[in-house]
Amino acid sequence: MTVDRAVMMFAGVMILVSLALGYYVSPYWYLLNAFVGLNMIQASVTGFCPAAIIFKMLGIKPGVAFR
């Protein structure tokens, strides 16, 4: 698995968890979806992704998008 795929998988998991928590616990959890979406937009524009940095530190090999 590359950093690119790990970042996309992490974002997808966070969105699904946030949707479930928003439905079953509190609608305020939907704000996490907004945060994840904004972070994905910011990462696509600037190339800076905190999750990619963390995954690199964990030893996952780099992919094409986040070097």
Image (cartoon, grey):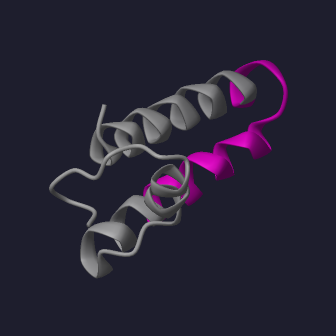
* 56 lies above or below 18: below
Q: In the rendered structure, does residue 34 fall within the stretch colored magenta?
A: yes
Q: Is residue 11 above or below residue 57?
A: above
Query: 51 and 36: which one is in front?
Result: 51
Residue farthest along the right direction in this orientation: 25
Residue drawn 66% across and 52% down?
Answer: 31
Q: Measured from the top left, where is residue 36 in percent x and y?
A: 52, 53
Q: Position of residue 43 (x, y in %)?
A: 36, 69
Pick the quarter of the image with the N terminus: top left
Q: Is residue 17 above or below residue 30?
A: above
Q: Examine the structure image and report whether residue 31 is included in the region drawn in magenta.
A: yes
On screen, residue 22 versus residue 26, left or right, reads left
In this rendering, the count of numbered labels is: 0
Which residue appears at 78% of the width and 18% of the height? Answer: 24
Q: Nearer the viewer, residue 50 or 59?
A: 59
Q: Locate the C terminus and report the quarter of the image it occupies.
A: bottom left
The residue lying furthest to the front in this view is: 59
Residue ID at (58%, 59%):
35
**Quarter of the view holding residue 40:** bottom left
The image quarter in which residue 65 lies: bottom left
Q: In x, y percent, where is residue 45?
A: 26, 77
Q: Is residue 65 left or right of residue 28?
A: left
User: In front here: 9 or 16?
Assistant: 9
For the record, the magenta segment spans: 22-38
- The residue at the far bottom in this view is 46
Q: State whether the magenta stretch is mostly helix, strand or loop.
A: helix
